[in-house]
Image (cartoon, rainbow, N blue to C red):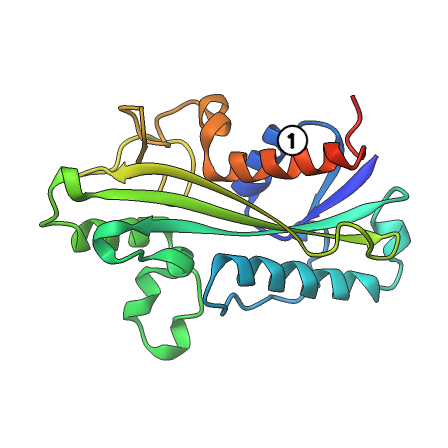
């Protein structure tokens, strides 16, 4: 079984990826590697942030003492993603700053830190206060970067996969599920927010689900995905 090292400390994100891809991988996260470096997401696009995270983590794992024992199996890949919300009325914001949207109002030293979901949601609603429902269109975008670390990087190095989910921003939050902007995002074709939908429903059409589906198709084309 191939080990898939997810470049995140976000348990919700790890659970989503596991539920979408199923049991064809052995899943590890940065919780299994607490000494892993914190990689600054300072690139201007989702694609560049995903590639930076994947490459820096893969490089660190390559020189990690005892890596063969800490990463089980004969093969392993790093999977990094960058994702976020693009709101048309805000010219695409928060975009790559989605996880730290509220921090942009803080002092320069604090702007690199992620901010609580509640703060990010509150800021988004404040900025859209005067925007009517028909102009609150938005989308979630996810870009995945996959790099092989075991054996040595080969055919999977640098592969990118993208997924987009169109929708709109609600007037107020609803639902207890999901994370991030899920209580405010209503996907196209549904009356409920991501946070109100059952995880199984969300995972059929979310931006991350679509990006992972594209990755799965690629792996199938290389005959690396059994059955």
Could you say where residue 163 lies in the image, as x and y percent from the top left?
50, 41
State left or right for residue 48 relative to residue 129: right
Helix, strand or loop for disc 1: helix
Quarter of the image with the C terminus is top right
Could you say where residue 59 lies in the image, as x and y percent from the top left?
76, 65
How many numbered marks does the figure carry? 1
Residue drawn at x 52%, y 35% is 210
Residue drawn at x 75%, y 65% is 60
Reading the image, the residue beneath label 1 is 21
Could you say where residue 24 lies in the image, as x and y percent from the top left?
75, 29
Q: Is residue 183 visible?
A: no
Q: Badge 1 local density, few (<14 within 10 Å), some, or many (20+)?
A: some
In the picture, residue 72 is in which quadrant?
A: top right
Q: Please determine whether, in this image, residue 178 is positioned above or below residue 75.
A: above
In the picture, residue 216 is in which quadrant?
A: top right
Could you say where residue 104 lies in the image, as x and y percent from the top left?
32, 68
Residue drawn at x 9%, y 50% is 130
State left or right for residue 134 relative to residue 5: left
State left or right for residue 186 relative to residue 227: left
Q: Is residue 164 visible?
A: yes
Quarter of the image with the N terminus is top right
Q: Please determine whether, in this image, residue 186 is positioned above or below residue 151.
A: above
């Amino acid at each position: 079984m191939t080990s898939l090292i997810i470049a995140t400390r976000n348990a919700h994100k790890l659970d989503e990826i596991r539920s979408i891809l199923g049991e064809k991988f052995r899943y590890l996260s940065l919780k299994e590697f607490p000494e892993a470096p914190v990689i600054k997401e300072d690139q201007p696009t989702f694609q560049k942030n995903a590639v930076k995270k994947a490459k820096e983590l893969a490089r660190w794992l390559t020189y990690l003492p005892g890596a063969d024992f800490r990463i089980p199996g004969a093969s392993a890949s790093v999977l990094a993603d960058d994702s976020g919300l693009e709101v048309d009325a805000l010219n695409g914001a928060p975009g790559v700053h989605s996880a730290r949207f509220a921090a942009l109002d803080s002092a320069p030293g604090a702007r690199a830190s992620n901010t609580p979901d509640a703060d990010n949601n509150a800021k988004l609603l404040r900025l859209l206060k005067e925007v009517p429902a028909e102009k609150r269109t938005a989308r979630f975008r996810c870009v995945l970067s996959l790099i092989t670390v075991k054996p040595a990087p080969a055919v999977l190095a640098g592969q990118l996969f993208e997924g987009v989910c169109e929708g709109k921003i609600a007037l107020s939050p609803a639902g207890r599920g999901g994370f991030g902007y899920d209580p405010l995002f209503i996907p196209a074709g549904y009356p409920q927010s991501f946070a109100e939908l059952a995880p199984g429903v969300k995972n059929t059409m979310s931006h991350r689900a679509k990006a992972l589906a594209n990755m799965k198709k690629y792996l199938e084309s290389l005959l690396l995905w059994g059955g």
